[in-house]
Amino acid sequence: MEPIIVDGLEFTEPHTTNRNVWLSEGLVLKLDEFHPDKHPNKLNRLRDEARILEDLTQQGAVCAPRFHAQGLRGDQPYLIIERIREAGEAPCIEVMRAFRELMRFGYLHGDLKPQNVIWDGSAAVLIDFDQTVHDPSLAALTIAEACDWADARKGDLPWRQCGLLREQLQRFGYPSNGGDPRLDLVKYPPRRAAEV
């Protein structure tokens, strides 16, 4: 298969399960098949995802891959981010640590599932931010309070998983009653060195 060159960077390795994702040694290229007549909001979602990742990178977040670039390749939107090497399944406490750090920056991940969490051996890193919601008030909430926050806004949240936050968290072992205080700490120290 021919490599793809975007932004002067060569991506030689197609992702094994997603034909719109290409890999290089240290970066990931996410291409979007943009069909304005079929998916008018798709371009905005990719731009929003890029904006979120750029903001998290500038703030030194370690719960998300670092933003590299975004743009158009012809009429096809693209996003380039840091490649995180997977080292197995993330422990529940580390997923909650990453989720809580994201909240500290005022973001709530709208599609939390095992495919959107990468364990690099020392920290859980969240990916796929196209359904993420921003509200600065999230920074002061515990995870249990964020579940209540999402429940109260089911009709207002723009993600298809809206109102399912508790169920999403339970996939990682978060208790259904939200009663485990070690998972609800307001501040989790990051486990991955922030390199900006």
Image (spheres, helix red, strand yellow):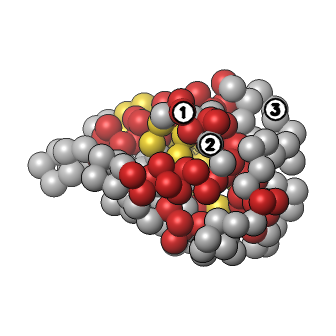
The crowd level at tag 1 (other Cα within 10 Å; few <14, some 14-19, many 20+) is some
Task: Choose between 27 and 156: the one closer to the eye.
Answer: 156
Hey, which quadrant is residue 55 in on the image? top right
From the viewer's perspective, is 87 left or right of 17? right
Q: Do residues under tags 1 and 2 come within 8 Å of each other at their CB atoms? A: yes
- In this view, 129 is above or below 180: above
Q: CA distance from mark 3 to mark 1?
A: 27 Å
**Left or right, 178 with reference to 164:** right
- For the residues labelled 3 and 2, the Cα–Cα distance comes to 27 Å
Residue 70: % across, % down:
48, 33
Q: Position of residue 126 (x, y in %)?
A: 64, 53
Instruction: Say which of 133 and 126 sits in front.
Output: 133
- Label 3 neighbour load within 10 Å: few <14, some 14-19, many 20+: few
The disc labelled 2 sits on which kind of residue? Leu
Instruction: Give me the residue at 64% from left, 65% from top.
Output: 178
Q: Secondary structure at mark 1?
A: helix
User: Looking at the image, which residue is at 72% across and 60% down?
Assistant: 95
Badge 3 element? loop
| Mark seen at residue 141 | 2
Q: Earlier in the sequence, mark 3 or mark 2?
A: 2
Q: Are marks 3 and 2 in contact (CB under 8 Å)?
A: no
**Residue assigned mark 3:** 195
Q: Which residue is mark 1?
A: 137
Q: Earlier in the sequence, mark 3 or mark 1?
A: 1
Please identify the quadrant where the C terminus is shown: top right
| Residue 91 appearing in the image | yes
